[in-house]
Image: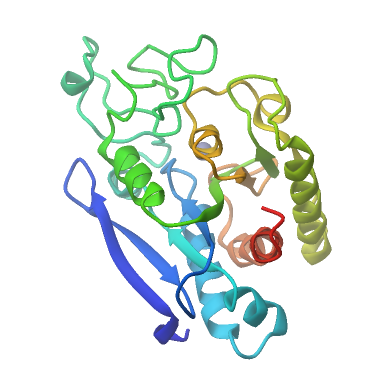
Amino acid sequence: MNSALVGVTNIGKSYEGRDIRSVKVSTGAGRPAFVINCGLHSREWVTPATCMYVANQLTSWYGIDDAVTDVLNKVDIYFIPVSNPDGYEYTWTTDRMWRKTRSPAANNGCLADCNGVDPNRNWDNHWDAPGGSSTNCCSDTFRGPKPFSEVEVNSQKEFVMGIPNVRAYIDVHAYSQYWMYPYGWSETPAKDAATLAQVGQDSIDAIRAVHGKRYETGSIADVIYVATGSSADYFYDAGITCSFAAELRDQGRYGFTLPEAQIVPTGEEAFAGLMVMAQAVADGTC
Ligand SMILES: [Zn+2]
């Protein structure tokens, strides 16, 4: 790790008061940016590990590896390694399968004693369109009482929108091995669908070349299901052309409890896919 390239900032505090941190990897001023978010769903443990693995690879190989050096000479890369820290802590202490934030039921207009909001159904993009989220407080896809009700979601939005010239964003999840792009709220193709499909295909080809794992690409609504109020749709409609949502390993054998032996291999193949996106920013594709 070459710490001279790294800047750490707090982008806000979680509901329970934990810092939400961003790691910026940059070698100079005035570059277009690529933002990589991990851990929005707290039980998807391989994703914070992947953000940290990729940040470490970039900073360790700058000036040594030609591809890394070239990308970092042209693009600033931001990581939000743990974007739902209350949920993440809860998965370590209380409930390994917790997905949502930890905002109290009473704050969310809930009669039932069910806490938390799905932070990937809480963005102000077709938030209340039918079929892509739940109004049930006890559901894992509960959208919350209003868009951006969750401080973690609102802080991330404010942070990313405050970065000049963000050209790519990816919200990293697990599991199922997908590399998807907007829209999630509808099967209507995005206006940049051809570009997104090409970047998606190049990413999954690079991933497969590392350990042979097959990922699938396509729009969120086509590949997985209709999902409203998602980060990828929000940032795409806010003007970030290459806005993606990934699902890392595996395809269901272990699911959220991916064995430790697969953490580094997952990071290695994700690194390859993310480098494709970073290169697409560097060459102006995105
Ligand atoms: Zn997820």
Quarter location, residue 183: top right
In this rendering, position of residue 198 left or right of residue 94 = right
Residue 93, placed above or below residue 119: below
Residue 130, placed above or below residue 48: above
Q: Relative to the observer, which residue lies in front, 169 or 223?
A: 169
Disc tally is: 0
Residue at horizontal 80%, vertical 54%?
A: 202
Residue 215 visible in image: no
Q: Relative to the observer, which residue lies in front, 51 or 72?
A: 72
> Residue farthest to the bottom?
64
Residue at horizontal 49%, vertical 31%?
A: 230
In this rendering, position of residue 30 left or right of residue 57 = left
Coloured how? rainbow
Residue at horizontal 52%, vertical 80%?
A: 59
Residue at horizontal 27%, vertical 45%?
A: 86
Quarter location, residue 157: top left
Q: What x and y, as percent, mark residue 147? A: 34, 24
Residue 242, placed above or below residue 277: above
Q: What x and y, as percent, mark residue 176? A: 67, 40
In this rendering, position of residue 191 left or right of residue 121 = right
Residue 38 visible in image: yes
> Residue farthest to the front?
30
Q: Relative to the observer, which residue lies in front, 41 or 253?
A: 41
Q: What x and y, as percent, mark residue 137? A: 32, 16
In this rendering, position of residue 266 left or right of residue 85 = right
